[in-house]
Image: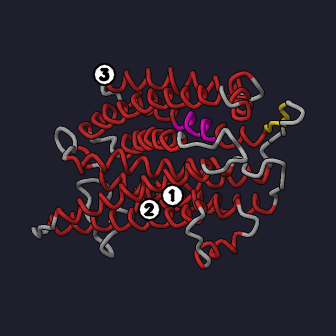
Amino acid sequence: MRRSFAIISVLVVLILGLILGAIGLSKKEVGEVSWGILVPGYMFFAMTAAGAALVTLAPSLFGYEGSSGELKSLRKLALWFAAGTLIPSWFLILLDLSRPAKFVDIFIGFNPSSRIAWMAALYSMTFVVLIIELLYAIIKEERTAEGLTGKSAWVITLTLIGTVVELMLISNLSQVFGVIQTFPAWHGAYLVPIFIVTSFMLGASGMGIFVVLSMKNREKETKFAASYYGKMIISSSLVLALLLFWAMLSAYFDPEAWASFSQMLKGSYSAMFWCAAVLGFLISPTVAGIAVRRKNTTAIVASSIISLLFGFTILYLIVVVPQTVYFDVLAGVVNERVYSIGAGELLIAVGGLLIWLSLISLGYLLLPLLPEERAKKLLIFK
């Protein structure tokens, strides 16, 4: 009875998210800044999804699954978390378009030289691979429980394919911006490592919360998650700090690029940037250090929440700020555009967040994601 009530409640939240998205679409406005909050929004979901799969599944390719196979126990959780997180990314992408129904044209008239066309293709490929991996993991575990052994080579092959596609997704997403010369702050190869490291941080943060909440009665896995994902958050935060410093140092010698970065450091967006920097580079790693040292689940949840907020803020600044400033070469001055989040954008973003939370919860309620759970209905449902 309690499970049925939980499923109904989650479905209500899911429907509410869809309704908010529909209302937001009807209220969207066109402003001076073309790529507003919805762009870093769907980037956040896509990078969190890819990062969760990479930090949890890719280590098995090198023979590491935890001291007692803990990462193997987290495999199905990570696969569903990643797949479920990609769906709201699609939701935001579609509603960010002026004509969502025409989205299929990007596949019909696929342009191999377009980064955006490849973005759509890689989103789709990543989702399909994640679902195949999840179905295989569920069915293979059921067959193993019945005494039928499966071929581990298939697991390795699927994990390898997934790892390659996920890295391609993040790299291509970064170069959607990196190849654009109109905004010098975006132009360059440094966005690739910045996006990959940010993805690791977001994925580890998302999984840190999901594992602790879904495995609250399994002390071995939750303590491992506190230590493992805490280390990931600390290391990725330190590397991201170095990469952002390097990007800003490089931009300092390019007046047009520096016009954007100076807005973050000492201009209109400086308060947002420095608050995020303190949270992401000081507070979150410190709390994560407590989680690692004491294997404390409360600390890893707190650090993960901070890192998720920090990661989104960094993506928002990287995407939005370069569009708000432009360098007038003849006059030698920097002009600034004003961007404010519209009501329609806000409703769509909140709708996407509700869809994300409801989908992750729904998967946990319906699918056998924990190690001891087995599929009992229609091969994949518990």
- Tell me the tag on residue 86: 1
Q: Nearer the viewer, mark 1 or mark 3?
A: 1
Q: Secondary structure at mark 2?
A: helix
Separation of disc 1 and disc 2 at Cα?
9 Å
**Residue type beneath disc 2:** Thr
Q: Residue at x 49, y 51 (%)?
A: 170
Q: Which mark is residue 126?
A: 2
Q: Which circle's residue, 1 or 3, is located before the other in the chain?
A: 1
**Viewer-proximal residue among 360 and 185:** 185
Which element carries disc 3, helix, strand or loop?
A: helix
Q: Which residues are magenta?
A: 308-316
User: Along the horizontal axis of the image, is 209 left or right of 341?
Assistant: left
Dots 1, 2 in contact, CB < 8 A:
yes
Relative to residue 217, is residue 50 depicted above or below?
below
Q: Nearer the viewer, residue 197 or 176?
A: 176
Residue receiving disc 3: 293
- Residue 164 rendering spot, x and y as whole percentages: 37, 57
Q: In the drawing, does residue 301 fall left or right of residue 345?
A: left
Mark 1 residue element: helix
State which tag comes first along the sequence, 1 or 2: 1
Instruction: Look at label 3 and name its amino acid.
Output: Arg
| Residue drawn where x is 59% and y is 29% of the image | 250
Question: Which colour scheme appears in the figure?
Answer: secondary structure
Inspect the magenta stretch and tell me whether residue 267 lies in it.
no
Dot 3, how many residues are within 10 Å of its Cα: few (below 14), some (14-19), or many (20+)?
few
The residue positioned 71% from the left and 42% from the top of the image is 320
**Disc 3 and disc 2 in contact, CB within 8 angstroms:** no
